[in-house]
Structures are given as structure tokens and as C-alpha cells.
Image: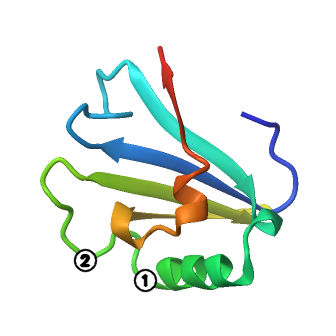
Amino acid sequence: MPKPTGDRLTIQRLGGLGGFSLPGSHIRSGGELALSQLSPADLKALDALFQRSAKSAAAVKPDGFTYRLTRTIGGAAKTVEVPEDQVPMAVRNAVKDTLD
């Protein structure tokens, strides 16, 4: 993962059939983006996610993924967890899987 500089979005993909990134899992699934890399539409969608509570009220599908998104702006970080279908595609595409 690149060294964080500026306003960033850190992404963790959790769950799924393989239990990605959960305790005991050997598969880590995550990524990081500079917020400046995102389109205005993607930034607007992210803003809407962060306006909600820390955990989305929407139900996660069985064996579906949850995304833990941490947005850092000006040194202040805020984290939300949302179902995969609410995450912009550009953010989902930044996720890479690694084996521990």
C-alpha cells in the first residue's frame, strides 16, 4: 500500500463466502485511494455514505461483502461500514486481495 499523503480513503472488504479480512482469515482484501483520484459523482456518493451513521442500517446479503471505509481529511478520520452494493465501482476496483 502506498504511504498515505493528503486526503485519503482506506478500504477494507470484509466477509463474503471466504470470510475475507475477518479474524483467522489468511486473505486480506483492501486498498487505498487519494480522494483526488475519484470523480465528482463518486465523491458525492461517498459523502452520502459518510453522512449516515457509522454502520449502515441496510442488511448485508448472506455471504455478501461489507466495506469498511475510512476517509481521512485534514488529519481527521471517520469510518463507516456499508454493504458492497452501496460502494462506488471506482472504490471497489481499488481493492486487491493478498494472502498472509
Q: Quadrant of the N terminus?
A: top right
- Does residue 44 appear to the left or right of 88 in the view shown? right
Q: Residue furthest right?
A: 5
- Under circle 2, the secondary element is loop
Q: Position of residue 33 (x, y in %)?
A: 72, 54
Image vertical order of residue 46 relative to residue 78, above or below? below
Mark 2, other Cα within 10 Å: few <14 / some 14–19 / many ≥20: few
Q: Position of residue 17 (x, y in %)?
A: 20, 37
Q: How many numbered tags mark residues here? A: 2
Question: As shown in the figure, which amino acid type bears the numbered disc 2?
Answer: Ala
Q: Nearer the viewer, residue 3 or 77?
A: 3
Task: Determine if residue 25 is in view.
Answer: yes
- Does residue 41 appear to the left or right of 49 in the view shown? right
Q: Residue 82's quadrant in the figure? A: bottom left
Q: Which residue is mark 2?
A: 57
Q: Residue 19's quadrant in the figure? A: top left
- Does residue 3 appear to the left or right of 70 in the view shown? right
Q: Position of residue 45 (x, y in %)?
A: 55, 81
Cα–Cα gap, marks 1 and 2: 9 Å
Q: Position of residue 14 (x, y in %)?
A: 35, 44
Mark 1, other Cα within 10 Å: few <14 / some 14–19 / many ≥20: few
Residue 52, numbered label: 1
Residue at position x 80%, y 45% from top?
Answer: 4
- Does residue 23 appear to the left or right of 77 in the view shown? left
